[in-house]
Amino acid sequence: MRFSNIANSVSRFLILFVLITASSEVFSQTLSIPSQDNSTDKWDLNFNLGATQFFGDASNHSYFQKWKGESRLGIQISVKKMFSPVFGAGLSLYSTGINSIKDRKSDGTIVDYTLGGNYDDLTAFAYANFSNLFGSYNSDRKISIYGTLGFGVSTWNTALTDNISGAVIHSGTTVGTTKFANKALAIPFGAGVDYRINDNWSVHANGTLTTILSDYVDEWKDGAKYDQLFFTNIGVTYYIHPGKHESLLGRKKSRRNRKSQDEMNKRPIPIFDYMVNPEPAPVESGGKSEVDMMTLPVQPATSPESPAPETKQQQPDAGLQYRVQILASRVPLRDPLLLQAKYKFDYPVKVFHQDGLYRYTVGQFSSYQVALSESRKLNSKGVNGAFVTAYRDGLRVPLTNAMMNQQVEKPNPVIF
């Protein structure tokens, strides 16, 4: 490969490297909307618009030189699903024009060739959020650095013209014994910077280098083994929140996967949500490790020290109590006020830290049956998986059949 081709490849990868290794201070910037949690945006739609440059045998200009007449409009549409705050996957459809000028061969001979046409590909891709991968996870992050790697199929319709002789070679045709292909596998690799505007929208700048596993996009073999396209673009992303998604599919999923409430109460405590924000560990005190009681008003309070609502009177932790668990996690929630604001619980939310888990509960009942009724009520309100747990003197204990079959004692009538 000629030195100029090597320089072109290095320059394109340097652009991607700069996007990936942006300042670490960028990682730490946060949104002004504290209620947003990026990890909950399971699905998103992306639209990108930019310029495409072709790099191959019918090209001997650098990335920056190609902005002077050798760039064509490109459009990309993609859909992505996030499986965690770091990794996701999706499908992408990319369509662009191609234009390239060749004025010198690899041996120095002066020529005058023009390549023109269009290119399309459909690829599946993996996504990684480098800000969350290499930095501390922050659900309120404002700016994120990300990368993508894909694999798919491509097709093109191009023509190589010799402006001196007037000869034209089209893709998909046969000249002598040479068949000029017009489709091949494609491998796109991209990196970008995303800026979160609000709960539903973000904008981003991205660079994607697509390697086509063919040397016939430009109908020319002159050293480069594979032809390449570089797509420099800006775009917008629309986030589809899980609450809206589950409202359409929740019933079907519940019929397929959920067991009865009584069976769930006997099962080990599941971890419902790992995608929460890390906080400093709670202070150990006494014979138990318990986060201070969080008394959460129906409407979000201005500070965590706001007083508890006067809805239901809570009793001290002494003795045996039944509580309804709504969430468990290995790290504490940054803002449990959002649970109260979203579901309008009749009882304050209290969190217990035991056995390496933070368990969020509501209610405080002396009867299992009353607690069971409350758990069913919460499930009907959309708190899927809420179930009854038992606590003795502030520590969680196994829920036994005897506890579940306990009958509420009725006081003897007074006879006058």
Image (spheres, grey):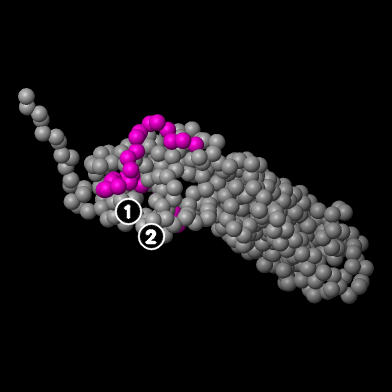
Task: Name the residue tied to disc 1.
Answer: 396
Q: Is residue 292 left or right of residue 43?
A: left
Q: Is residue 172 visible?
A: no
Is the C terminus in the top left, top right, bottom left or bottom right quadrant? Answer: top left
Q: Earlier in the sequence, mark 2 or mark 1?
A: 2
Residue type, label 1: Arg
Which residue extends farthest left?
416
Residue, disc 2: 355
On-image quarter of the N terminus: bottom right
Horizontal side of 261 relative to 290 (left or right) equals left
* Residue shown at the point (25%, 39%) measured from the top left: 370
Residue density around tag 2, few if under 14, some if 14–19, many if 20 or more, within 10 Å:
few
Q: CA distance from mark 2 to mark 1?
A: 9 Å
Residue 138: % across, % down: 59, 52
Q: Is residue 320 magenta?
A: yes
Circles 2, 1 touching at the beta carbon (< 8 Å): yes
Q: Nearer the viewer, residue 300 or 158?
A: 300
Q: Is residue 21 above or below residue 33?
A: below
Range shown magenta: 306-330
Q: Position of residue 393 (x, y in %)?
A: 30, 51
Residue at 44% across / 50% down in the picture? Answer: 291
Question: Does residue 104 show up?
Answer: yes
Q: Point out residue 217 in the picture as x, y percentages from the top left corner.
A: 73, 62
**How would you rate the neighbour count of disc 1 (Cα within 10 Å): few for under 14, some for 14-19, many for 20 or more?**
some
Q: Position of residue 9 (x, y in %)?
A: 77, 67
Among the 4 quarters of the image, the one containing residue 293:
top left
Question: Between 27 and 290, which is closer to the camera in this rendering?
Answer: 290
